[in-house]
Structures are given as C-alpha cells and as structure tokens.
Amino acid sequence: MDDHRSDNVQNGKLSAGKNISCWYEPGLDTRLFPELLSDLETEVVIVGGGLAGLTTAYCMVCSGKKVIVIEDGYIGSGETGRTTAQIVTALDNRYYEMEEFFGKENNALIAESHKEAINFIEEVVKKENINCDFERLSGYLFLHPSDKEENLYKELNTLQQCNINAMMLDNTPGIPIEKKCIHYPDQAQFHPLKYILGLSKAIEKKGGLIFINTHASEINHTGIVSSKGFKISAKHVVVATNAPVNNKYATMLKQWAHRSYVIAALIKKDSIPRALWWDTGDKTIHTSTPYHYVRLQSHNDEHDLLICGGEDHIVGINEGKSEEERYNDLIKWTQERFPIAEVVSKWSGEVLVPMDSIAFIGKNVFDKENVYIITGDAGIGMTYCTIGGLLVTDLINGVKNRWEEIYKPSRFILKASEPFFRMLKGDLVAVLKKWFYRDTTELSSIKEDEGKVVILDGQKCGAYRNPSGKLYLVSAECTHLKCMVQWNKDEKSWDCPCHGSRFTYSGKVINGPANEDLPSFSENSPE
Ligand SMILES: Cc1cc2nc3c(=O)[nH]c(=O)nc-3n(C[C@H](O)[C@H](O)[C@H](O)COP(=O)(O)OP(=O)(O)OC[C@H]3O[C@@H](n4cnc5c(N)ncnc54)[C@H](O)[C@@H]3O)c2cc1C
Ligand code: FES
C-alpha cells in the first residue's frame, strides 16, 4: 500500500486528501478490484464505492437484482475512509429541535430508521462474518460550556417520546468533570474500511460486480459512460457519490459542506471505559456549532487509539483560524479530558449538512423516475448510508417503505429555510469575491509546498509548487457552478467555498458536486 500512498495527493485515488486516516493499516488493501474495460448491461448501476453505494449494492444483490458498482478511486476513497465510524441514534442535531420541523410522529420515524440501521449493520456483520471490530457500546452526551442543562432535559424528554433508550447521569463516565450527561446504552462502532471490504466480498459472492479506477463522466436514466468511453446500460441508476454529481442545483442548494478535523492519539489500554462521547457544541458559533466526538479503537497490546474529532467550520468560512490551530485546539481539548500520549495521525474531511438536518434519499429531483440519490449525511453517515441502501432498494423493488416521505430529496421545509437563504447569500458573496479578486503575485514568488490563486493573462489560476519545486497550474474556476476555489494547505487540495467540491493540486476532482477536473495549464506554464 505504501507505494500508493505517495502518489495519492496527486491522483486522490486512495483517499480524498494528503492526510491518511488511521483506518489505512498495513495489509489492508482497497485496490483488489478490476477497472471497467468493456460495455456492460445490468439491472442496477451504482456510482460510488463508499458506504452508501456498497450498502445499496449489498441490499440489491440480496433482493436478487443484477448490480454493478463503479468507483473512480479505490474502495472507501471518499469520506468513508476519513470517518470516525461511530454508529449512532444520538444524532448531531437535537431531536427536540428536529421536532419543530418534522412533528412528533415523523421524529419517531427518523429515530426508528437510525435504530434499524444499527441493527442491520450488526446482522450483516454476523451473517457475512465480517471481521470489522463491530461493537455495541454506550454513548454519553455532555454539555458544552455555552449550553444549558435544561436543554439536556428537553432532549431526554424528546428521546423518550421517540422510543430511544436514554437516561440522565450525574457524571460523565470516563471524563473527569462532574457534569450531567445523557447516557445512550445502544450505540455502536466499527472499522469502516474493514466493514466495506467485507460488504464488497459479499456483493461479489452474490453475483454483483465492482469496478474501481472507473470515473462516471456521464450519468443519466439509461446508465453511465465512463471517462474511457465504456457504457453500462441499466434499468435503475443510483448515485451514491456523497455530494450527488448528477444534480447541479436542486439538492446542493439545500445543503452545505462542513470541514471536520480528527486526531488519533495513543492511550494506555483499559485506562478509560470503551464508549463514545460527544459535547453539545459551541453555541457561540452560529454558522456551524462545532462539537467534539470521541471514541476508542484497538491498536496494539499496550495501547488503544483515542480518536477525537471536531473544530468543524463551513467550507470557505474558516473564522480566521488556520488548520494547524484547529488541530492544536483539538489536541488541547482532548488532553484536558483524556490521558492521551503521542498523536499518531491527523486528518480532515467533509460532512454535508442539509438545511433541515436529515439526509436526502430517494428519486432524484427533476430527473426520470429510475434515478436515485443518497446524500446529506449530516455527520451521521454510517446510519444514513445504511438507511439509504435499505430505502432505495425498497423503492427500486416497488416495496412500500414508511421512511420514503421523510427522506424525499424534493422536500423543502419552509420552517427550516433560514440556512437556505444564508447559503444563497454566501454564494452571491463568493461570486462577487471572484469578480473583484485582484492579485499581483509573481509565479516565481510561490514557495515550495505553497498554493495560491494568481492572475495570469487576466485569468484566475490555482498555482501550487510541490516540495521538489515543480509548479502546477489549474483553472481556479470550480467546474460545478464556477465559484473560485481556495487552497487547502492541510490536505493540499483546491476546495470550493460554495458547495464543497474538491480537486487535487493537479486539478483532479475528488469531491462532488463537481464531476469534472479543473483544466490544467501546467504544460503551458510560463515558468
Ligand atoms: C471527519 C469525519 C468524521 C465523521 N464521523 C462520522 C461518524 O463518527 N459517524 C457517522 O455516522 N458519520 C461520520 N461521518 C460521515 C460519514 O463518514 C459519511 O457520511 C460517509 O462516509 C459518506 O459515505 P458515502 O458513501 O455517502 O460517500 P463516500 O464515502 O465519499 O463515497 C462516495 C464515493 O463516490 C466516488 N465518486 C464520486 N464521483 C464519482 C464518479 N463520477 N464516478 C465514480 N465514482 C465517483 C468517490 O470516489 C467516493 O469514493 C464523518 C465524516 C467525516 C468527514
Ligand atoms: S461546489 Fe458549487 S460552485 Fe464549486
């Protein structure tokens, strides 16, 4: 695997960014599948080899359908390889807030869908004998200093109405602060890459086909065409690309991208209980209300890994804080609460937050009846991707599903529309910023390992010089809706502040909604 790590930053095939998460252990290979090199026909084609695509493929083959999955990197190379893989009914948004949008009955259905998703994962792990460190454990939600105790009681009350097993405790187990917390006894966690590799094996065993290194450059109701020109004709098309690459406006204007940061540190085995922890989030930052999320993962005979995430911000709004400061704050926060030793990995990833806080799953808006999308993970994609697989399979098989209406991608809940208008305003600001962007940087002044948007012959270009001095020049205009990309110093990528598309430094698209690379000018570089 190591030889492939080195060129990952340029081609993004192993993972969407320079930093590699702790899940990429030696010996774990996500490349064990062929590339699509001929035209094929099938009943269902699924675009995206992350948790959503592979769960859907698994459910579909189990229901007897002929399925093909295509993935443009390796298996899990999107956000599934960058997750922290807590599997929860304790959502990032509070149920008492969601009740305002969805009402009591639908709130209970949302809770039910997450419970069933956890049960489903547990059953699949057993049935397919997937060795992925799945375990059931408790989760503890404790107050952020900016939040009030009465909100914990409100949440507990709503959880009980939604039939989620939860209770109040006077202290938070594992954390040396005497503060009340909600205890959720039935949460879970696993190793995400081992789980999806297990799913992939099961899909193949049941007759499904998986192709990697295969980019779907055209997607419509008849199937897909790969960037090398091979066609897969299909009766049903499922786009599970995290941000849907087949839907430019209808969905991406109803959700926005957050960047979340993670550290994994050594911690002595058995020094704290095995559990999940979350705080309720910083209410003083209204744009993203960042919260911390913590879990353990077995590592070696002496140590476990304590994995802690947080420091979220909306992509493009970094509130004047650098990535380095965010990692440092995350380490400090963790050290103040847990007896950690050396930090062994750091990475970041993108989470898609829908305006009303729940996923968009079902028939693609303004499209033919046989095209489906799974998107809007809201930071709890382990369950949403699983719900997506279950629901889309029912829709394709014509089976009535009581979650269909709640997760419909066409919904627009007026009460939850404030973020939608905030986002439109943000898009407008981004367009104005692009128009008025002025820069006089000479290419020669760009240092090694530095990236910047510069103006060359009146055109905005992303310029990056690698550590050996080679200059890469790409168009700085995002191929989704033409906002100007920004340099991500931490992951060495060009990120779009409008809807979160990302590109490697050489312009290859690694996150939707954009589906085309940034044009590259490196060969004509004036240097
Ligand atoms: C830092 C972080 C922590 C998180 N922690 C948690 C957690 O603890 N619990 C939880 O429930 N959720 C968590 N999440 C969210 C969760 O990880 C994601 O929601 C989930 O992994 C998304 O899976 P997916 O299959 O939808 O997308 P992805 O895993 O991104 O898969 C989409 C795939 O589509 C491929 N693709 C894109 N375009 C094309 C194309 N044109 N042709 C072919 N293939 C294409 C991509 O290469 C990619 O592999 C976290 C996310 C982040 C970033
Ligand atoms: S992601 Fe929409 S314009 Fe870039």
Image (cartoon, grey):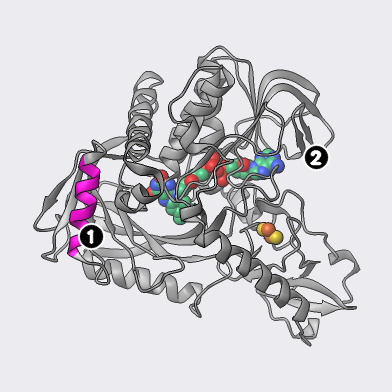
Nearest to viewer (mark 1 / mark 2): 1
**Is 514 drawn above or below residue 333 in the view shown?**
above
Q: Would you name the residue on which mark 1 appears? A: 151
Task: Quote the CA–CA distance across marks 1 and 2.
Answer: 51 Å
Q: Residue furthest left?
A: 170
Secondary structure beneath disc 1? Answer: helix
> What's the residue type where badge 1 is placed?
Asn
Image coordinates of residue 356 in percent, x first then y, are 46, 51
Residue under the point 36% across and 64% down: 343
Q: Is mark 1 within 8 Å of ligand 1?
A: no
**Alpha-carbon neighbours of circle 2 within 10 Å: few (<14), some, or many (≥20)?**
some
Residue 524 within the segment the image draws in magenta: no
Closer to the chain start, of discs 1 and 2, is: 1
Left or right side of 144 for 318: right
Taking the view exactly as shown, the residue that stands out farthest to the front is 414
Q: Specify start and end residues of the magenta stretch as a single range.
A: 149-160
Quadrant showing the C terminus: bottom right
